Amino acid sequence: MSKLKPKNGYLVLRPIEEDETMYGNIIIPDLGKERPELGEVIATSPTYNFHSDQKIPSEFKLGDKVLIPKLGSVRITVDSEEYFICKEQDVYSILVDEDQENELEEEPKIF
């Protein structure tokens, strides 16, 4: 079995399939709707900052559920498993449960 190890600010995500909308026995497709992809972080990497000659740790944790653009990521298949690879800066948002919401910082970090 192969293992993916991202480099320089990339994330490896396992896609999370969304449920289809059904009314009775009829499936309502989401054709024509461009929606972001949903994925779970399974590997991260630090970003190397050339100006300060430091590695900046990833702000994502393993198991985080994130939204990424359909066209901003690469979809690959390794050992018959499908994955997304994208840069940290391409992630739209982390999905947070109401239980975890109290644990998050109230003020965003500004670099």
Image: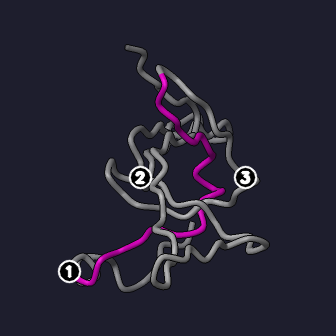
Q: Which residue is mark 3?
A: 72
Label of residue 107 in the image: none
Return the disc, 2 or 1, that comes first in the chain's sequence. 2
Return the disc, 2 or 3, that comes first in the chain's sequence. 2
Q: Residue 2: percent from the left, percent from the top?
A: 42, 15
Vertical side of 69 occupied by 51: above or below: above
> Residue 82 lies in magenta, yes or no?
yes
The residue carrying pointer 2 sits among few (fewer than 14), some (14 to 19) or many (20 or more) residues within 10 Å by Cα, namely many
- Specify the amino acid type for callout 3: Gly
Q: Residue at x 70, y 57 (%)?
A: 70
| Quadrant in which the C terminus is drawn | bottom right
**Is there CB contact under 8 Å for labels 1 and 3?**
no
Magenta-drawn segment: 80-98
Q: Which residue is mark 1?
A: 99
Residue furthest to the top in view is: 1
| Quadrant in which the N terminus is drawn | top left
In what element is the residue under mark 1? Answer: helix
Of residues 43 and 18, the one drawn nearer to the viewer in this rendering: 18
Q: Residue at x 55, y 72 (%)?
A: 110
Of residues 26 and 40, the one drawn nearer to the viewer in this rendering: 26
Q: CA distance from mark 1 to mark 3?
A: 30 Å
In what element is the residue under mark 3? Answer: loop
- Specify the amino acid type for callout 1: Asp
Q: Nearer the viewer, mark 2 or mark 1?
A: 2
Q: Residue 98: percent from the left, percent from the top?
A: 27, 84
**Is there CB contact under 8 Å for labels 2 and 1?**
no
Q: Which residue is mark 2?
A: 40
Q: Residue 36: percent from the left, percent from the top?
A: 64, 66
- Specify the amino acid type for callout 2: Glu
